[in-house]
Image (cartoon, grey):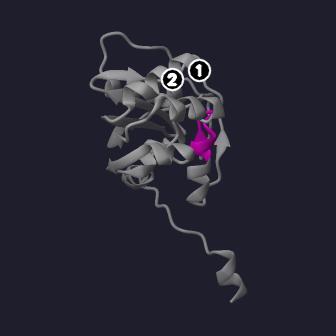
Amino acid sequence: MGLASASPRRRELLLSLGLDVELIPTSYDEVPLAGRSPIETALVHARGKVAGAAPSPYLTIGADTIVDLEGHALGKPRDDADARYMLAALSGRSHQVHTAFALRDPGGHIPIVEAVSTLVRFAELDRATIDAYVASGDGRDKAGAYGIQGFAATLVERIDGDYFTVVGFPLAAFARAVARLGFRLLPRPSLASHLA
């Protein structure tokens, strides 16, 4: 399987399904899109990444995650000040996380482009907590300036929806999508089963 993304989290998630994953460079330039909703932006970016990826004999994935705070897209922070601003804006409020993905077949066709959304509510964050999290550097390369799979899990009060969408790739929706293309994901035998 090809992955048109530099995200180590997406690669790890796909590897967790037992897939062989090859990183495929993309020429797509991800820029803000004026006049588009956050979910539309995620869909356009996911399609653009996979369309701009180098040719591959494998099924190739492009994906994009955007944090949507009342219709305003929060991408990756530009710097620490921007990260502090985002986290303060998210404090004590609910927001949507949209992860879009696009699948390109070996013939270059893109038959599937879809998005999954999850509602996330942050706890009230004080300035010291925000400053400490930003200083850790954990949210620098993540939409909304946080990564739920790390320390930021302590900032989240609750989620309603697919956890993996917030991490950056909706595994269950992806499995259903590849099934529609005629592929079937099956678990690999574990090492323990070989030793039994």
Q: Which residue matches tag 2?
A: 84
Q: Nearer the viewer, residue 143 or 33?
A: 143
Query: Image height check: is 87 above or below 158?
Result: above
Can residue 29 be seen here? The reply is no
Amino acid on which disc 1 is placed = Asp
**What's drawn in magenta, residue-wise?**
2-11
Q: Nearer the viewer, residue 109 or 39?
A: 39
Q: Residue furthest left?
A: 70
What crowding class fits label 1: few (fewer than 14 Cα within 10 Å), some (14-19), or many (20 or more)? Answer: some
Q: What residue do we see at 59% from left, 20% from top?
A: 80
Q: Position of residue 154 (x, y in %)?
A: 48, 48
Query: Image height check: is 181 above or below 43?
Result: below
Q: Residue furthest bottom?
A: 196
Q: Are marks 1 and 2 in contact (CB under 8 Å)?
A: yes
Residue 191 falls left or right of residue 29 = right
Q: Quadrant of the C terminus?
A: bottom right
Query: Image height check: is 54 above or below 152?
Result: above
Disc assigned to residue 51: none
Q: What residue do we see at 52% from left, 26% from top?
A: 49
Q: Which residue matches tag 1?
A: 80
Q: Position of residue 139 (x, y in %)?
A: 57, 33
Please check the rendered image and state whether residue 3 is part of the magenta-colored stretch, yes or no.
yes
**SS assignment at label 1:** helix
Residue 101 falls left or right of residue 134 = left
As measured in the structure, the alpha-carbon distance from the residue carrying label 1 to the one carrying label 2 is 6 Å
